[in-house]
Image (cartoon, helix red, strand yellow):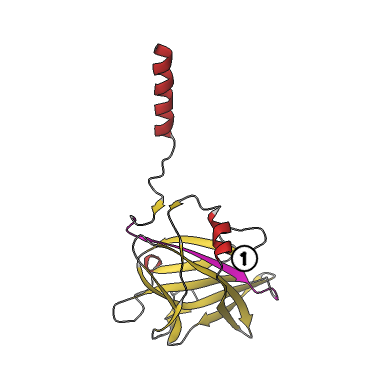
Amino acid sequence: MRLIFALLSTLLLAQCATPGRDNDFQVGAAEDAYVIIGIAKAPNIDTPRYDMLWRLVDETGAFTDYDDERALNVETNSNSIRVRGIPGEFITARIRPGVYALDGVYAIIRDGRLDYYADGLILGPERPSFEVRAGEAIYLGIWQVDLEDTRAVTRPWRIDGADLRAAMEQVDALRGEVRIRQTVPRAVPCNPQRMNTMSQRRVC
């Protein structure tokens, strides 16, 4: 009997010591939202690093003030999910619920010891957007990023449930169904300004 109690105590302690799933995103119960998006470089040039910026839109239809808590940054060569046979990488993020619109895309091109920059700010006002509610998990498909002349650009490439299922095999911190969400055009005005005093990048 003592052996049984000892084994049960050991099992209980092991469960307490093992990180639980309390921090997982539970569809339908979470107060925030969950987004999965793919980003793939165009096959003609693989050198640049890209950052695609989606920002929260307020009740008046304008961008909210820029900060990390009101934005979704989708970066290449980041801590992302890669799936054999599928171009690019998948980014997962927990964000505030609401309407998000694409501010633009930015590229950094490394040439020896020098960095060159390609701005892709969307002056608009029309731009892609999506809405996500509290407790929702959505998939926005794979977006292709590229350089056109001196500008960084992005466009939706494909949105396929097979890609989503393949990516989900490597996502542990989400419980529940992920819905495919198409972006829609939305007019959001842009007043270009420097992101900060240390950066050449412009945001709306």
Q: Please report the residue visible at 36 percent of the width from the left and 78 percent of the height from the top.
A: 63
Instruction: Tell me: 201 left or right of 189.
Output: right
Give the residue number, with chain letter if any, for mark 1: 88
Q: Please report the residue visible at 49 percent of the width from the left and 74 percent of the height from the top.
A: 199
Q: Quadrant of the C terminus?
A: bottom left
Q: Position of residue 141 (x, y in %)?
A: 53, 69
Query: Relative to 24, does residue 152 appear above or below in the rendering?
Result: below
As shown in the figure, which amino acid type bears the numbered disc 1? Gly
Q: Is residue 35 magenta?
A: yes
Instruction: Tell me: 27 left or right of 37.
Output: left
- Rate crowding at label 1 as few (under 14), some (14 to 19) or many (20 or more) other CA atoms within 10 Å: many
Q: Main secondary structure of the magenta part?
A: strand
Q: Position of residue 82 (x, y in %)?
A: 61, 58
Read off the magenta span. 30-44
Residue 125 image-quadrant placement = bottom left
Q: Is residue 168 magenta?
A: no
Q: Position of residue 189 (x, y in %)?
A: 38, 86
Q: Please report the residue visible at 69 percent of the width from the left and 73 percent of the height from the top.
A: 43
Residue 22 image-quadrant placement = top left
Query: Relative to 129, does residue 180 appear above or below in the rendering?
Result: above
Instruction: Tell me: 55 left or right of 199.
Output: left
Does residue 79 appear in this view?
A: no
